[in-house]
Amino acid sequence: MPLTRHRPARWSWRTLLPWVVGLLPLACGLAVMRWQTDRDLRASSQATVAEVAGHVEHILDSLAAAARHLQPRAGQPCEQVQLALRVEVTRNAFVRSTNLFDHDNLYCSSLFGDFDEPVDPRDYTDGRLWLMNGNSVTPGQSLLVYRSSQGGRGAITTVDGNHLRTALRLIGDDDELQVQVGNHWMGADGQVHDGTPPVAASAAVSLASSRYPFSIHGGYGPDKPGELMRSRYPALLGLLLLLGVVAGASCRWQLRRASSPRAELDRALDAEEFLPYFQPVVRKGDYHWAGVEVLMRWQHPREGLVRPDLFIPYAEHSGQIVAMTRALMLQTAQVLAPHAALLDDGFHVGINITADHCRDLRLLDDCETFLQHFPPGRVVLTLELTERKLIEPAPVTLELFEKLHAMGVMIALDDFGTGQSSLSYLRQFQVDYLKIDQSFVAMIGGDALSQHILDSIIELSAKLGLGIVAEGVETDVQRDYLARHGVDFLQGYLFARPMPVEDLLLALAARPGRPRLPPDAAPEIMRG
């Protein structure tokens, strides 16, 4: 039962929800930060790639200019043009060597003069550009070669790959950059590789030059977004963590509040889970039923029937017992009134009330509504005062008791002899009945002191002209002792246990001379 029963610990949605709520701000914040970080990295990568592409185009502009200047000299003897080749190398910082070819044969070089080496146009992307992994002079040293031709003749200029490597390193020091020409590519390590360059793990960007047949690929490694988030958003990360803790704690508090005893009792009251159970009270002599005491039971949807000692004390402490008792009185009237013919005139119906009821004049309306359900004189309503809270003799309380008696409602002191205020109640309030606590009844034939107290209570009630009811009668010895001492009414397991309304009505109908219940009465009672 949610109020006091401890269940074994297990994971449930109530356990997981605070964690989910706590992680939600952090997850959403991290998602937004990651989105912004990826966006910034992509913008940075695009800018870097564009800058590298522009630098490479600037290098190729120098090569192309030198090649165009030398191209008209192609086909002339090497000794006549060698000086011009060397002048172009000297005047241009990017040009490493210049060469002339005729009919796909390189015949003159700025480095060696006369030369003889075949030129295959298929090595050049778009017939103009070749990224080489070295030549016969500098094997293993990357070169970018530009070819300009017309009519089978032309010029070839080269640039050292270190210029490209420097651009890749200095412009994008923390980027992963590659320059690709045809089926060859080079990274920041300066080595030329065949195939397609690898795609960056994050912010991968590619940009093809519109002027020359090459492209630049850029991006960042897999750890770059995390590094950037930690360096750029440390305060925001701390705030998100704090918000997550606050959100999770607030959710947990709300769940605990929603599952608190007060909230659980309010839920049960709205769901009409509190049911009346009835324990008969018999009169001495013939031991016929003179009435019933209405006891509250809780039909919990998961726990089943809950004992009253698990929830009544808390309901009295929290003040919810007033609303619960009001609902119980109305439900009792609604289930008994259709079968009022089964009840003897003057049939007593006892309902427990506490000090909280005695400070509220609405109890008069509740009692009047209860009695209006029955024919006049058929039912005698008895309010049994419990002593868990002290009842103060305030003006409103005295007025309440006076009007209750005027209405015909009787007052009984429940569990008399066990509380500290029982005798003071006799002086301050007009009481009709005393109910002897079952602890004294249980001592009949045993503890002498308790039996003397019991005899004194019986004698006191006789002198004050009060009716007396003995609770907890379980044996024939107790019954006979109480009968000999003039106890008016008896109640206990010897006669009947508390029962639901359908069992009560069936028992009342089974008495001789009583009208029989219709066959469909029990299902109708259950629905009521």
Image (tube, helix red, strand yellow):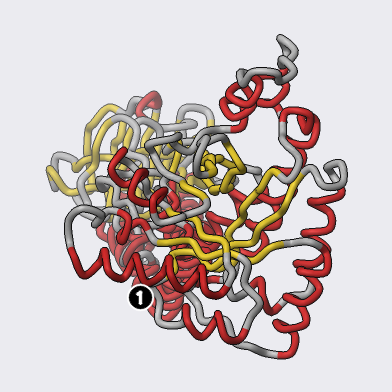
Q: How many marks?
A: 1
Corner quadrant of residue 367: bottom right
Quarter of the picture containing the C terminus is top right
Left or right? Give the position of 407 relative to 411: right
Residue located 25% across and 66% down the image: 450
Residue located 56% across and 34% down the image: 288
Measuring from the top left, give residue 201's x and y in whole percent: 35, 46
Q: Nearer the viewer, residue 46 or 423?
A: 423
Q: Can residue 145 be seen here? A: no
Query: Vertical placement of 356 versus 348: above or below?
Result: below
Measuring from the top left, give residue 484's x and y in whole percent: 39, 51
Residue marked by disc 1? 231
| Circle 1 crowding by C-alpha within 10 Å: few under 14, some 14–19, many from 20 | few
Q: Nearer the viewer, residue 462 or 152?
A: 462
Corner quadrant of residue 436: bottom left
Left or right? Give the position of 270 relative to 312: right
Measuring from the top left, give residue 88's x and y in whole percent: 38, 61
Q: Can residue 165 be seen here? A: yes
Q: Nearer the viewer, residue 76 or 345?
A: 345
In the current view of this chain or complex, which residue is farthest to the top? 519
Residue located 83% across and 58% down the image: 368
Measuring from the top left, give residue 474's x and y in whole percent: 33, 41
Left or right? Give the position of 446 relative to 70: left
Q: Nearer the viewer, residue 122 or 450?
A: 450
Residue located 73% across and 12% down the image: 520
Corner quadrant of residue 326: bottom right
Question: SS class of the residue under badge 1?
Answer: helix
Say which amino acid is labelled 1: Ser
